[in-house]
Amino acid sequence: MDIEGFVRQALKKDDEKSVEMQLQDKILEYKNITPQQANKMALAVIEEVKHTLKIEKHDDGFLKELIEYPKADVAMGQIGVGSRGEGDFFVHRKIADIVSSTHTNAFITPEAQDDGGVVKKSVNSNDIYVTTAVDGIHSRLSEYPFLGGFHVARAALRDVCVMGADPVAVISDLHLADDGDVGKLFDFTAGICAVSELVNVPLVAGSTLRVGGDMVLGDRLVSAVGAIGISEYPPTARKRAEVGDVILLTEGSGGGTITTTAIYHGLFDVVRETMDISFIKASEAIFNAGLLPEVHAMTDVTNGGLRGDAHEISNTTGLGLTFFNDKIREMINPKVLEMLENLGIDPLGVSVDSLMIIAPKDVAEKVKKAVGDAGVAISEIGYVDDTGKAKLVKNNDVEELKPLFREAAYTKIKMVVGDTTPDDFELMKEKVEKAALDAIKKKDNVVKAIKGK
């Protein structure tokens, strides 16, 4: 529970004494302390929050601008941030706009909406491409730190691999709330290190803090893992796809999303299916066979499932992609596919963690052999065309592949929230757009002020 956030909201509608008593009771729900100690905490938080509210009346305009943030009046959940659908993609594009406004140089920027970012450096007259990626722990795996660490480490390494880079290091950022057991730190780190050991990529640095410091009660784990890779060749970014290319897919057994689905539906046997490194083995096979320079693009089927990835690739390249439904189904782990279908979850709308490769026909044949020889199932599932749309061929019918407002609902709570587009989505986008532009303006003002000191 965010007690600072509670006080900020409560002071707007209740008197201070009432807020004090409410907060004291809430603190006692989490802390094994006396009512007197809880009351001291409550009074301290209220006093601190009251001090911060004075900034609204401060006569230093620059300081006020630094402290306040541009409000969109659109909540994260309302527009579906983190839910890997249309709303989430829109917000990520606005984040990319802020990054682009810096005019700093990168070979692949967030604007490309690719799996990782890439910078190009010249070392002794040789070009080196450095790829970085970061992924956050699945929010529903807070109670299962090892699984959270394992799958987020895999995700970060995948994002580096699909950009055609050889992963060389992993870093972690670990935040555990005030009442969390320290053992969660160790279990999460062990999960990362299991992947690290399996793929021989060291965990080299990290940070460990509390979620919200003293202001957040409970034991929620919120963490991320980053990966760094290098390559002598240009990245296998989405924008390199060409008309006539073949689309390949490796078998996917899922990661954090499928693990969460299995756990929260009581289908624990499926969790075991997700514990593999076949994705990284497939990437290594392509790398070791020297095929990366010939592969046009690679991506992992994660954000919003194949629906989301296909839509984003089509948007980025302006090209069309045609997929065959029966071929895709063959590349989803049978137990995972059975679970999704029994639960009524669209297999194309969730992350199944397959590796998707786009390459010319002759190169695709070489890729299939290299990956197959590494013991990973792989199949041709479609092709690139010039229609400008992502399409699915299913039972002789053709439908356009579009991401839903949110990814396919894979837990009970997500099913309650739903995945339909809100009636005011366009209005929300306008508000978000303005907030992003305001953030750019604020950044420009601060940079200008610092340079002028």
Image (tube, helix red, strand yellow):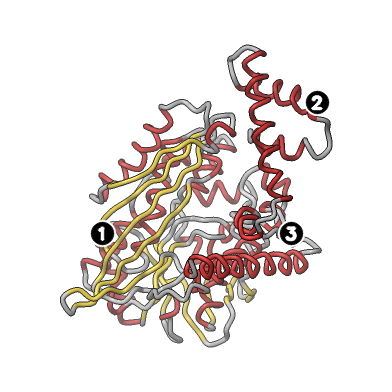
Rendered-image quadrant of the N terminus:
top right
Image spot of residue 283 (x, y percent)? 31, 63
Residue placed under numbered mark 2 in the picture? 18
Query: Closer to the observer: label 1 or label 2?
Result: 2
Which residue is at a point 65% across and 31% down the rendered structure image?
45
Image spot of residue 291 (x, y percent)? 26, 74
Image spot of residue 225 (x, y percent)? 40, 49
Q: Could you say which disc has been placed on residue 272 in the image? A: none
The kind of residue on which mark 3 rests is: Thr
Mark 2 neighbour class, 10 Å CA radius: few under 14, some 14 to 19, many 20 or more: few
- State the CA–CA distance, disc 2 to disc 3: 39 Å
Mark 3 neighbour class, 10 Å CA radius: few under 14, some 14 to 19, many 20 or more: few
Residue placed under numbered mark 3 in the picture? 420
- State the CA–CA distance, disc 1 to disc 2: 65 Å
Position above or below: 353 against 393: above
Position above or below: 308 against 23: below
